Image (cartoon, helix red, strand yellow):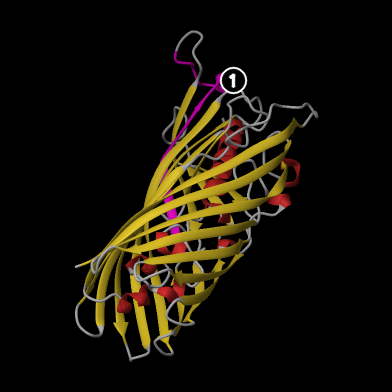
Amino acid sequence: MNKILTFTALGTMMLISENVLAAGFHLREQSSAAQGNAYAGATAGAEENSYAYYNVAGLTRQKGTQFSLGGSYIAPKATAKNVRDEDGNRDADVQNVVHAAISPNFALSHQVNDKLFLGIAGNSPFGMITKYDYDWAGSDHGITSDVKTATITPMVAYKATDKLSLGAGLQAQLVWAHLTNSHSKSRTGIVTVGGHAMDLGYQLGMLYEFNDSTRIGVGYRSEIKHKIKGKMKSSGSELNNIPGYEAQGAGADALMNQRISARLNTPALLSMGIYHDINDRWAVMAEYQRVFWSSFQNLTFVSRSGMNNPATPGYISRVEEKWRDTNFFALGTSYMLDEQWKLRLGIAYDQGAVRLQHRTPRIPDTDRIWYSAGLSYQYNEHLNFNAAYTYMYAHKSHLDTSLTGNAGRNVTAEYTNSIKVFAFGLNYAF
């Protein structure tokens, strides 16, 4: 039993850590207006209350009561080519490794008086879906991953002086995970893990307005420490070799069910931005963001139900991770075409969190260049619309699992990646 638990536990730990914690799948897409500028100046822009995700202090620029609603359709394309197993045998290319998803967002803000502003926002800051064929060469490193998050953030902002605004928020974050891989040794059975968690974090922000044309902002979203609880189910003929275990019937695969828990962190984010109106038509902006993936150093997996023996002590294992902090740089500009239409443009560089020696099939992560464009339309004094499009070009990445030191058969591959993002949103001022 200990042998098979070792295989399944290590495989499960790799699935959880590699899928949730990847810089390439931190979803910045929380404002269709900000996306049009590739999020340049998002921390300082405060053009509507959807910008509060990046800097809660910007709520002090949202007069009266306002409501924003939006969503982004994220369409990634990742292909694994020249796939080879540890014996050097060529496997078929894997198309559409990463699947499309929708990231919704909303924000509601209210001006209490000249100094105090309240708000609440909802978004999905982390998530992805990946899927390989069950019989592909790296199936013991991962087959299916479906991870979603949802965060609700009550917020408060205070105008301390005519120039300085401060803000804070409380993040309540839910995470769900459904993950599968084959058994590490034989690849004849499937390990399935499902679980969820809800934990708390916080948000801080500062906005300083030098004058009506120029402002800077700093935003911080804290690390959130999750303890995922759920179940692990393992099926396959390997389990029939465990003493004292009986298959469910003649010719049936053996099944193992265990309660599991795993601790992991979603990282802290520090953003700094600047916004400047050149004149009545032109504006320029810039952004820097640091994502602290290095806070995730290990993942501990605990199985608390022994097979056929509930009194069996929980199995505990630990995997060391080697994520690095990442940087995001963006430059943007906006141009007022007329009194109603605004054109937005932006370009950004997004650093990947995973180096070659730690890259796995779960996350073919690498550096990306963002190209963004957007349009804003002021329909009337109450209602405006935003639309944006982003194309991300990702550098080619190479995979060699023999470098990672993780359990499982060695596999090599070459990945080509790109992402298209379509966003739409509206803002209504009451």
Q: Is residue 37 visible?
A: no
Residue 385 coordinates in the image, percent (x, y): 33, 60
Q: Is residue 184 magenta?
A: no
Assess disc 1: are there few (<14), some (14-19) or many (≥20) residues with their C-alpha within 10 Å of its C-alpha: few
Question: Which is more toward the observer, 404 or 204?
Answer: 204
Q: Is residue 30 visible?
A: yes
The residue indicated by pointer 1 is 241
For the N terminus, the image quarter is top right
For the C terminus, the image quarter is bottom left
Residue at the extreme front:
338
Residue at the extreme right:
88
Magenta span covers which residues? 223-248
Residue 167 coordinates in the image, percent (x, y): 35, 77
Question: Which is more toward the observer, 188 or 145?
Answer: 145
Question: Which is more toward the observer, 194 or 371?
Answer: 371
Q: Amino acid at mark 1?
A: Asn
Residue 372 coordinates in the image, percent (x, y): 53, 59
